[in-house]
Image (cartoon, rainbow, N blue to C red):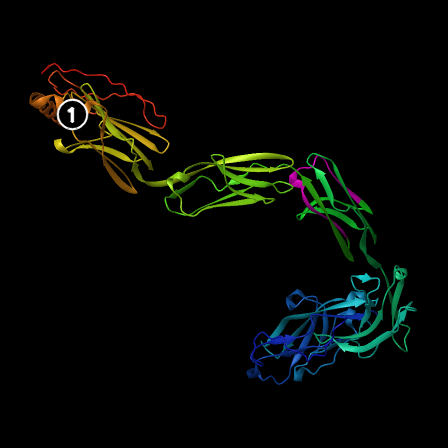
């Protein structure tokens, strides 16, 4: 549809305030038929304080600067103009009323170009306005056909010719419009820049048979021999329709798949196979195959065939389902939690069809889902027993796979009941077994001697970690008399626990039989133990590697070797003898 409105002449001013500065208005472009005339509307303004007695003006061709000696189209002072415009130009406007409208007659192609106006108020009050009008000399009516002429949809074809010659008015008629509809003449309409056009419209619904039809428009000027004709060929198109397509396809991983798409359209369509917005194949043709060799699960999904041309499009989809065994499940990584916290573990995989997912711990099923790609394991309040290795297993009719993951539960130390002390001949070994996460520190306290030995005192304490268990052994030599009380204390960032280690075995009866003399000897030996521990700690402040001299007296030894299988089952010792007191 052509939208034309009648608008008043607007001023294009250098300043927004009227009468304050030099400024001019004229259409930026204007057209007219060869051999006719054209009126270029023009208005101008100048500062009111100049108050000239007479206002003159000059029209220039193709240049606004007098020093370039452009052709003079019109000059009010002398009426001297360039030879190309002699007898063909005159002023229609009144310069005193600031109207500079110019009329050009008997137009020829060489008059096409830019036209500039210069105001002359006398003396130095002369100004060439930068605003100008471009004149286009034509000899063919303008037939406007919509960019899309689609069969079955109403179209509007318009014929437009300029009507800017006050002396000659064009009359429009359609040529070859029979069977297409009756024209509607809109008449003379004003454009938005103050120029005028004659418009005639032709509405019709094209068919496929109208494709290539030659439609014409004629502009004639009464009482003259001037006639101008223009033609346009109708290019009636219809959008593609996909007429051939695979139905849904199922294929086993590794097999060959061929998908077909065919369409009917005019002109031939561009056929495009796409998946997830990615173009896989395309061609301008009636049909197009998409061949997939040794399909993989990554090619599973919906494939779209798009048929399009400049006037429409059609598309259809086909779903390809690739059957395959589950992929190795993924979990949300190794989990670390504090005792009592809630733990959520997600296990997921990909397969077709969807698998059976199961989470095991020590062959015990903790959670399972059927025909789901994800499995959530919720442990509302984890305990140390929840620590360990878990398995997520996925299976369908095409195969099975599994992934292991670990849950680490952190908790305060727990001294186990198998912790104890035992004596054999003159050696006492105290075993402290602690369950903890993270690894705790362990210290042995002899309250009656006011001595504490920790695991850093490697002359006396040996520690070994196995899983969540830490086993520490305190070895004391020279304990021929009653052994001392021993308290094991373990701590980590979550808490502390202490336990007085009980003595085990028949050696308890021996202490009751040794009598007073044995008690004196035992007391002396215990004093020696305390002194030795004190001396050893003092030496450690001097050197990193402890050593024993001939003057060292205590019979204290630490070098146990053992292995743990749930609990230590073997202890071996070696003795370091001193030379004094023996």
The front one of 164 and 565 is 565
Which class describes the residues within 10 Å of circle 1: few (<14), some (14-19), or many (20+)? some
Q: Which quarter shows the N terminus?
A: bottom right
Could you say which quadrant of the image residue 232 lies in?
bottom right
Q: Is residue 103 left or right of residue 50?
A: right
- At which x and y percent is residue 313? 76, 55
Q: Which residue is painted at 51% across and 46% down in the image?
A: 376
Q: Is residue 545 left or right of residue 493?
A: left
Range shown magenta: 288-307
Q: Is residue 582 left or right of residue 386?
A: left
- At which x and y percent is residue 350? 60, 41
Q: Which residue is painted at 30% across and 37% down in the image?
A: 414
Please name the residue that numbered disc 1 is placed on: 536
Identify the element where label 1 is drawn.
Answer: helix
**Res 311 seen here:** yes
Q: Is residue 522 left or right of residue 200?
A: left
Q: Which quarter shows the C terminus?
A: top left
**Res 326 seen here:** no
**Numbered marks: total:** 1
Q: Which residue is painted at 16% across and 25% down in the image?
A: 536
Q: Which residue is painted at 70% across and 45% down in the image?
A: 279
Q: Is residue 243 magenta?
A: no
């Amino acid at each position: 549809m052509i939208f034309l409105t009648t608008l008043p002449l607007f001023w294009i001013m250098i300043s927004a305030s009227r009468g304050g500065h030099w400024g001019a208005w004229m259409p930026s472009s204007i057209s007219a038929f060869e051999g006719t005339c054209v009126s270029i509307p023009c208005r101008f303004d100048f500062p009111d304080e100049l108050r000239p007695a007479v206002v003159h003006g000059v029209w220039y061709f193709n240049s606004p600067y007098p020093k370039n000696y452009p052709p003079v189209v019109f000059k009010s002072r002398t009426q001297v103009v360039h030879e190309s415009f002699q007898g063909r130009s005159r002023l229609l406007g009144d310069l005193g009323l600031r109207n500079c409208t110019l009329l050009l007659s008997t137009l020829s192609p060489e008059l096409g170009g830019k036209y500039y106006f210069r105001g002359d108020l006398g003396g130095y009050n002369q100004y060439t306005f930068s605003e100008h009008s471009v004149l286009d000399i034509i000899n063919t009516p303008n037939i406007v056909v919509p960019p899309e002429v689609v069969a079955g949809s109403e179209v509007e074809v318009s014929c437009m010719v300029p009507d800017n010659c006050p002396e000659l008015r064009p009359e429009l008629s359609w040529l070859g419009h029979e069977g297409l509809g009756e024209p509607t003449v809109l008449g003379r309409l004003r454009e938005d820049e103050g120029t005028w056009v004659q418009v005639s419209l032709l509405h019709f619904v094209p068919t496929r048979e109208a494709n290539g039809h030659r439609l014409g428009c004629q502009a004639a000027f009464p009482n003259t021999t001037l006639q101008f004709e223009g033609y346009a060929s109708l290019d009636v198109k219809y959008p593609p329709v996909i007429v051939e397509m695979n139905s849904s396809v199922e294929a086993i991983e590794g097999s060959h798949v061929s998908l077909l798409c065919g369409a009917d359209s005019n002109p031939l369509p561009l056929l495009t196979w796409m998946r997830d917005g990615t173009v896989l194949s395309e061609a301008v043709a009636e049909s197009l195959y998409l061949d997939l060799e040794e399909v993989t699960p990554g090619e599973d999904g919906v494939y779209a065939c798009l048929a399009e041309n400049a006037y429409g499009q059609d598309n259809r989809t086909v779903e390809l389902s690739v059957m395959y065994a589950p992929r190795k499940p993924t979990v949300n990584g190794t989990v670390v939690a504090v005792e009592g916290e809630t733990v959520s573990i997600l296990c997921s995989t990909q397969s077709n069809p969807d698998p059976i997912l199961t989470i095991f711990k020590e062959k015990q099923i903790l959670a399972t889902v059927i025909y789901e790609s994800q499995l959530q394991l919720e442990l509302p309040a984890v305990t140390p027993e929840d620590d360990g290795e878990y398995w997520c297993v996925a299976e369908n009719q095409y195969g099975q796979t599994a992934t292991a993951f670990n849950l680490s539960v952190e908790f305060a130390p727990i001294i186990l009941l198998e912790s104890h002390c035992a004596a054999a001949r003159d050696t006492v070994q105290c075993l402290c077994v602690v369950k903890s996460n993270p690894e705790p520190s362990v210290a042995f306290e002899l309250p009656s001697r006011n001595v504490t030995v920790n695991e850093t005192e490697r002359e006396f304490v040996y520690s070994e970690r196995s899983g969540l268990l830490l086993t520490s052994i305190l070895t004391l030599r020279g304990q021929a008399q009653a052994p001392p009380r021993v308290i094991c204390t373990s701590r980590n960032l979550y808490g502390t626990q202490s336990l007085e280690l009980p003595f085990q075995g028949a050696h308890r009866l021996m202490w009751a039989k040794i009598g007073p003399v044995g008690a004196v000897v035992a007391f002396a030996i215990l004093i020696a133990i305390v002194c030795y521990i004190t001396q050893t700690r003092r030496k450690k402040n001097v050197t990193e590697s402890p050593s024993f001299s001939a003057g060292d007296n205590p019979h204290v030894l630490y070098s146990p070797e053992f292995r743990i299988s749930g609990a230590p089952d073997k202890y071996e010792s070696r003795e370091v003898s001193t030379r004094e007191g023996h």
